Amino acid sequence: MSNDSEAGATQPIADSVRLALPGEAPAIAEIQRRIWLDQLGPEQAEAMLGSITQDQATEAWQTAIIRPPQARFRVLVAVESDRLTGFAATRPSDDPDADEARDGMIDEFGIDPAGRSRGHGSRMLNACVDTLRADGFARATLWIMSTQDDFRRFLTEAGWAPDGGHREIGTEDDSIRIKQVRLHTEIGPE
């Protein structure tokens, strides 16, 4: 008969979402790059990410984890067995029409293309909402590309809806423009 520590050593880690650790910044940066390549294609992704090296992206994620820019800024990771499959960042909304006390946002949200359709997105979305609610927000927002029909469907099935917000992001020289729409959901008391 084995003891509990031996049994625990052979058990796989359950799929979960938790706060990111500083040493996971390189994996987050790699997943982020794969997601952009998947969503935008190599040419547009390279134009958008070409000025940022993998080391710079890693450093930015490490800083966000170790020294977040705000007290209510969190970096979360989705874990499958012993590897990361996704990441998200939550924070107070910085949208011009946001109510600082009430509106939180999911600033980043991504599941590695190789890890999709296994429940990681649902777990991550629920963890983001729980985190924003625990940080005192009553409404959550999230910007998505206007062409992300599957992601929009996933969000609307989870109770999110467009709120009329729209914007464009892109390269500094305007050679690439990406249209985004904002979705929202109520998450707590008014």
Image (cartoon, rainbow, N blue to C red):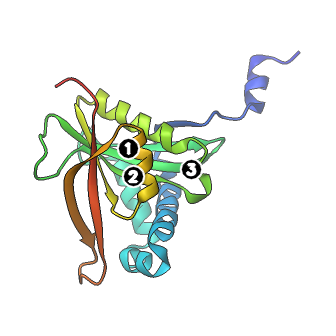
Looking at the image, residue 148 sits to the left or right of residue 121; the answer is left
For label 2, the residue is 152
Q: Which mark is residue 85?
A: 3
Q: Quadrant of residue 137?
A: top left
For label 1, the residue is 156
Label 3 crowd (10 A; few <14 / some 14-19 / many >=20): many
Q: Nearer the viewer, residue 75 or 114?
A: 114
Q: Mark 1: which amino acid?
A: Thr
**C-alpha distance separating marks 2 and 1:** 6 Å
**C-alpha distance separating marks 2 and 3:** 20 Å
Task: Tell me where residue 131 appears, x and y as whole percent.
Answer: 35, 33
| Label 2: element kind | helix
Looking at the image, residue 156 sits to the left or right of residue 69; the answer is right
How many numbered tags mark residues here? 3
Question: Is 130 rendered above or below residue 162?
Answer: above
Task: Tell me where residue 80 appears, x and y as whole percent.
Answer: 62, 43
Quadrant where the C terminus lies?
top left
Q: Earlier in the sequence, mark 1 or mark 3?
A: 3
Which of the two marks, 2 or 3, is nearer to us in this view? 2
Task: Tell me where residue 11 appears, x and y as whole percent.
Answer: 74, 30
